[in-house]
Amino acid sequence: MKIASFNINGIKARINALPEWLDEADADVVLLQEIKSVDEAFPRELFEDRGFAVETHGQKGFNGVAILSRLPLEDVTRGLPGDDADEQARWIEATVMGDRAVRVCGLYLPNGNPAPGPKYDYKLAWMERLHVRAQELLMLEEPFLMAGDYNVIPQDEDARKPEAWREDALALPATRAAFRRLLNLGLTDAFRARTQGAGHYTFWDYQAGAWNRDNGIRIDHFLLSPQCADLLSDCQIDKAVRGREKPSDHVPIWVTLDV
DNA sequence: ATGTCTCAAACATTGAGA
C-alpha cells in the first residue's frame, strides 16, 4: 500500500500539476493539505474519474485538508478533537480498508509565526491536542499514521540554513520539544527510519530563489504507530516535482507499507 | 531584509497568510 502526502497550496492553482503527479505516483491513498477551498468547490470529479474516493474538510480561502483513496474508506472524521471553538480545517481521519485496516490522519499543523504571539500559542496548543489524539490512537494497538505538513523542522540537519530559522516558529526549541514528545510516545519518523543525514527537504520558499539554491527545509512528515512501523517498506520525497511548471512550494512525500 | 505565490475582497489593487 502506497500512501502519499502533498501540501498543494491551493487546489485551483494546482488543477494541472496535481493530476499530472497523481497519474504517475500510483498511490493508493493521498493526503492533501492547504486545499484552500470549501467542500462544495473542490473538484472531486477530477479524482473520482481516476478511481479515488474523495473526502474533504475545507474552509474558505485558507487551510483545508482532504483524503483521496482507491481503497474503501470508513469512519471518516473531521477536525482535531480538544477545542470545540477551533474553526480551522486542519485535520481529517479515516480508516483505509486494505488487506489490513490502517487508520490515516491527514494534518496541516499551524505555521505559528510570528513567535512569540497568539499564533504561536495556537500552534503549541494544537500540538498538545495532537499529542492527546496520538495517545488515544496508540491505546488501540493498531496500525495508524499521522502525515502532512507539520510546519516543524525537527533538527538542524533538516534545513539548508539552520541559522536562518533560529527564531522561527518552525524551529524554536519549544516547537522541536513538542515534536520530540510525539516521537517519544513511540511514533516513528518514517523518513528518518530509512534515510539519515542532511540535504533532504520537502519545502522550498517561492522567494529569493530558494529552489535554485536548494535552500529547503524538511517539514512534511509521516509519523507511524509501532504496529504501522512494523509494516514500513519505503519512504521517499518526490523532490523533482518542485522543479516543474507552476509548482506548489511543497513536494509530495510517501510511504509504502507491506499490507 | 525579503527578490513569491495564493486567495478574497470586488473588478484593480491591496492585505493576509505563508
Image (cartoon, helix red, strand yellow):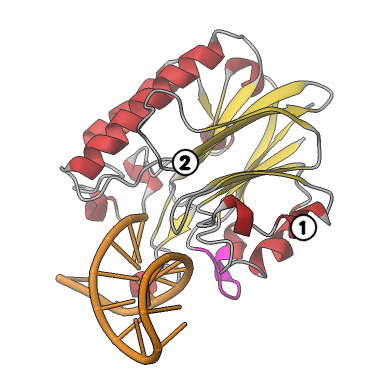
Spatial CA distance of label 2 from label 1 is 22 Å
Residue picked out by circle 2? A90
List x then y, in percent, for residue A237: 59, 50
Check the residue under mark 1 and report the chain it is in. Answer: A
The number of discs equals: 2
Extent of the magenta region: A242-248
Please name which of the two marks, 2 or 1, marks the residue nearer to the observer: 1
Q: Describe the element under mark 1 as helix, strand or loop.
A: helix
Q: Is residue A197 above or below residue A160?
A: above
- Find residue A255 and report its horizontal and vertical position in percent: 66, 38
Query: Mark 2, residues whose alpha carbon is within 10 Å: few (<14), some, or many (≥20)?
Result: many
Tell which of A173 and A135 is nearer to you: A135
What type of secondary structure mainly makes up the magenta span? loop
A245 falls in the magenta region: yes
Residue at image position (80%, 33%) is A72
Look at label 2 and name its amino acid: Arg
Q: Percent x, y for residue A199?
A: 45, 52
Q: Is residue A11 left or right of residue A109?
A: right
Q: Nearer the viewer, residue A223 or A123?
A: A123
Residue A31 is a magenta residue: no
Residue in front for this viewpoint, A31 or A65: A65
A190 to A215, vertically: above or below: above
Q: Which mark is residue A45?
A: 1
User: Residue A89: x, y in percent?
Assistant: 47, 43
Residue A50's image quarter? bottom right
User: Is residue A82 in view?
Assistant: yes
